[in-house]
Amino acid sequence: MTDSLSFTNVRWEADIVRRAQAEGTVASHWFADYFLFNKDLLPALPPFAVGRLTWDNWLLYEAKRREIPLIDASRVVLAIHQNHNYSYDKRLTRGGWNWEHPEVKANLALAGGQEHTRGIHDSDFVLGAVGVWPAWGREHLARRLHRQPFRPLQRTVRTLVAFACIHAALGAYRAFSRLRTLWHRL
């Protein structure tokens, strides 16, 4: 968007949403713009350069490390991120994606390296139009397999075994009920 917004227009919010849906692009799963949590849930933020790479991904990592469930709300929250230039700092010629920039390098060091970052696809749950569901989508499962190749498999096998046992027990109960009904008719 290069033109000015008129906030005196009563439809300015609807206009922005319409333009974002028509002209916008969905960013990578590494971009996280909204965080909701109790202020006592996470420790004080290290002295990151907020707005540069890695600080938000470390925040997701820290939540996962503390076993705090992450909920991906990207299906129901329309996050509109304003594009802007970085003309104030010539070292950011590629926008905020310059991994060689001193602030970005400092952020990565404060985070403890790339292995201490997470993205939206590392979420445990997904918020949809009808509630919160386990994050079993293709992207979420692929991230789990990438991070911990055997742990999600173990969880998935346990879930499938539990489902199969419940299904078998229900089937056996139904069969027994039918057999009992036939026995009483004799």
Image (cartoon, grey):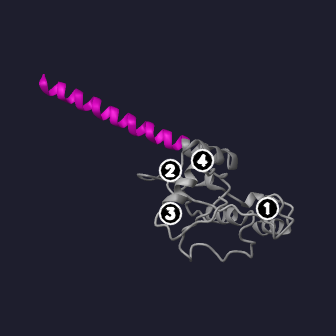
Q: For the point 85% across and 65% down, which residue is it? A: 101
- Across and down, in percent, residue 35 comes to 58, 66
Report which residue position mark 4 lands on: 140
- The amino acid type, in three-letter code, at marker 1 is Gly
> Image quadrant for the N terminus?
bottom right
Q: Residues within 10 Å of mark 1 (few under 14, many from 20)?
A: few
* Residue 113 - label: 1
- Disc 3 and disc 4: Cα gap in Å? 31 Å
- Across and down, in percent, residue 53 comes to 75, 63
Q: Is residue 46 above or below residue 57?
A: below
- Disc 2 and disc 1: Cα gap in Å? 28 Å
- The amino acid type, in three-letter code, at marker 3 is Glu
Observer-nearest residue: 133 or 35? 35
- The amino acid type, in three-letter code, at marker 4 is His
Q: Residues within 10 Å of mark 2 (few under 14, many from 20)?
A: few
Report which residue position mark 2 lands on: 134
